[in-house]
Amino acid sequence: MSLLVVGSMAIDSVKTPFGEREEAVGGSATYFSVAASYFTDVRLVAVVGADFPADTLAFLEERKIDISGIERSAGETFRWRGEYGFDLNTAHTLDTQLNVFESFSPRLPDDFKDTGFVFLANIDPELQADVLGQANAPRLVACDTMNFWIEGKREELLKTLSMVDLVVINDAEARALSGEANIARAARRIREIGPRTLVVKQGEYGALLFHEGGVFSAPGLPIEDVCDPTGAGDSFAGGFMGHLAATGDLSEAGMRRAVVFGSVMASFNVESFSYDRMRALTSEEIDARYRAFSELAHFERL
Ligand code: AMP
């Protein structure tokens, strides 16, 4: 089944202990759609300014991502500047310039309206709700968010969360959203807002899946060459939703496998700045890493 994403397309400036990159292409929808394109057909809704690199749009098309939902505006593209210390799990936002997002009103092309799987990537929660209102009864709706919106647009965000089936956020966001320091309690509170399922990403330590059936834990793969964690969360979501949309399997076992495919895509993404490492992955590379996750978490019960 096809997968629709709405989110940010950005020009990022990022500094990590291992280097820095000025004006690199980023954005939640960009990372998400590149990762998901290894699994299924992706339809992308976003806005870019006149300064957005044409070669990135050409690359997305090469990956067979439907970019007819990208609005090209005369203004400047959304910009984000962030920094990481040795704790790569925490991004410090230094600057956010909404630019073309200030006046963006997303419009779903008619042939996007019946998409079965919808991901509302990190973006203004009012825009997330707006897109959802234009979709015709999707089979699964999931969303992400971040502290910028949890603090700045809390009421709007709670409204969006009450309309989705599944939420994918990181542990710091889960704590900020719920007001609970304990992750299990935070998960329960967030599920009480509406979503039946919650995935909490824990950076290099892996991810937790909370739902009716209980909790599943996927490990983080210890990788030696971590370069830049920007976009790891969105790449995770791309692998996770991409696998669900490709298989249509929303069972407990299917969800667990999707969490691992999410972890696989995030693990590739952190090996480079921007989405460089995800430009040309082979299915053999993806499968090999999927097996590495399975071996890492495997143990024999006595
Ligand atoms: P992640 O590291 O997966 O949480 O997401 C990183 C991406 O989120 C970067 O490429 C940024 O351009 C984008 N981003 C940062 N702040 C925002 C925001 N307030 N709204 C939407 N996207 C954002």
Image (tube, helix red, strand yellow):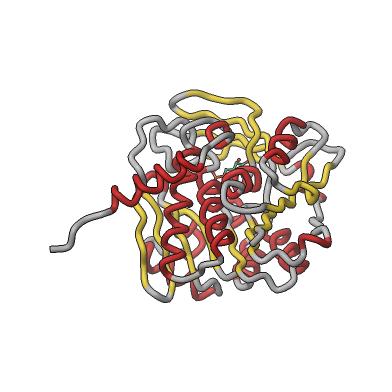
Where is residue 257? Give x, y as percent. Answer: 43, 59
Total marks placed:
0
Relative height, residue 54 to residue 135 (above, below)? above
Left or right of residue 4, residue 180 in this image:
left
Q: Residue furthest top?
A: 19
- The vertical placement of 301 against 269, above or below, is below
The image position of residue 100, as x and y in percent, is 79, 43
Residue 75's quadrant in the figure?
A: top right
Q: Determine the quadrant in which ligand 1 lies.
A: top right
**Percent x, y for residue 58?**
74, 35
Name the one closer to the observer, 177 or 39: 39
Tell which of 112 and 185 is nearer to you. 112
Depth check: 36 or 80 in front? 36
Q: Residue at x 59, y 63 (%)?
A: 142
Side of 295 where 235 appears, left or right: right
Q: Quadrant of the C terminus?
A: bottom left
Q: Position of residue 201 (x, y in %)?
A: 44, 53
In this view of the protein, which residue sits in the foreground, 216 or 101? 216
Q: Residue furthest front?
A: 284
Is the residue 167 above or below the residue 48 in the image?
Answer: below
Q: Residue at x 61, y 53 (%)?
A: 40
Residue depicted at x 41% and y 62%: 256
